[in-house]
Image (tube, helix red, strand yellow):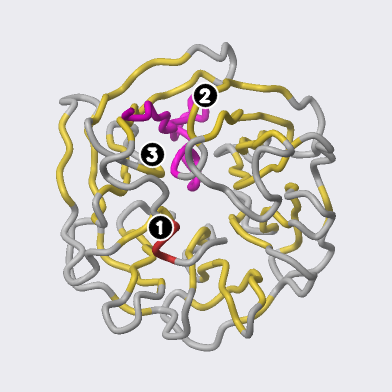
Amino acid sequence: MQVFTEKRGFSERDALSTLEAVDVSTGERSVLKEFDHLIEAPNWLPDGDRILYNAGGSLWIFRLSTGESQKLDTGFAACCNNDHVLSPDGRSVGLSHGTAEDGWSRVYTVPLSGGVPRLITPIAPSYLHGWSPDGSTLAYCAERNGEFDIYTIPVEGGEETRLTFAPGLSDGPEYSPDGKQIWFNSVRSGLMQVWRMNADGSEQTRVTWEEGSNCWFPHLSPDGKQVAYIAYKKGDVAPGDHPPHKNVEIRLMDADGGNGRVLCSLFGGQGTLNVNSWSPCGRKLAFVSYTPIS
């Protein structure tokens, strides 16, 4: 986890962005759109034709059918980073916005049709990653008293609940489709690895044992049977860092941790796969690759 000013990854001038999709059965990649500026973190909407992403501090919706993007009206929230999540019904989006008074990221919700953002986490910094399937709860990474841990909070706001207490960064909390578990990544073993726990924080269990990699941002398929995540080669990054400008792999495994494989390799990192980007049908993943501007 990084402070908000670094969460944006590349600067707008550093790279060209390619929005892609990969078939999880064949590994075949297809280009959806090339951009001459930085975009990050695609969320595939339930209708299958729209993909949400962030660029330039705003959220945008790309239509596959037209190849065009439209800016989402998020009111005063004009400093959004790549931590955004769709509500289970696809009608709202939770976002992380750097507030003007201090620049720290706080969590808000806003209708996907546009409107005034509603503040959910007055305490900062907070970085949103998960929305429970029943629509009642948000899960996020937050720094409190120098420690980055995973918290949950009612979607209407209220008291937050801390779920992780292990030393080091825990990040990327995302609910399983049945709402019974939260998947996340944690550096508590010395390398960043994929973990899961019950939704109340109990039974925290390590899932990946990749001694040559640092693994980030697990995303469960719509049927809950597979998990996609991004991996950096050990030595390329510090275990608690997920920067851009790196060769990375998108990996896939069964939800029990078995049958792991590399789905594709690319130049990316921060911004590539921060959020759940499974297609509604569960056959594809959307992601962003980058081409540096020399």
Asked if residue 289 is among those painted magenta in the image, a careful observer would answer yes
The one of 104 and 133 positioned closer to us in this rendering: 104
Residue under label 3, please give it: 44
Residue under label 2, please give it: 266
| 1 vs 3, front mark | 3
The one of 112 and 180 positioned closer to us in this rendering: 112
Asked if residue 43 is among those painted magenta in the image, a careful observer would answer no
- 16 is higher (above) or lower (below) than 168: above
Q: Is residue 84 left or right of residue 205?
A: left
- Other-residue count near label 1 (Cα within 10 Å), few / some / many at <14 / 14–19 / ≥20: many
Q: Is residue 282 left or right of residue 203?
A: left
Looking at the rendered structure, the kind of residue marked 2 is Leu
Q: Is residue 59 left or right of residue 154?
A: left
- Name the secondary structure under disc 3: strand
Q: Quadrant of residue 290?
A: top left
> Which callout, 3 or 2, points at the residue further toward the start of the chain?
3
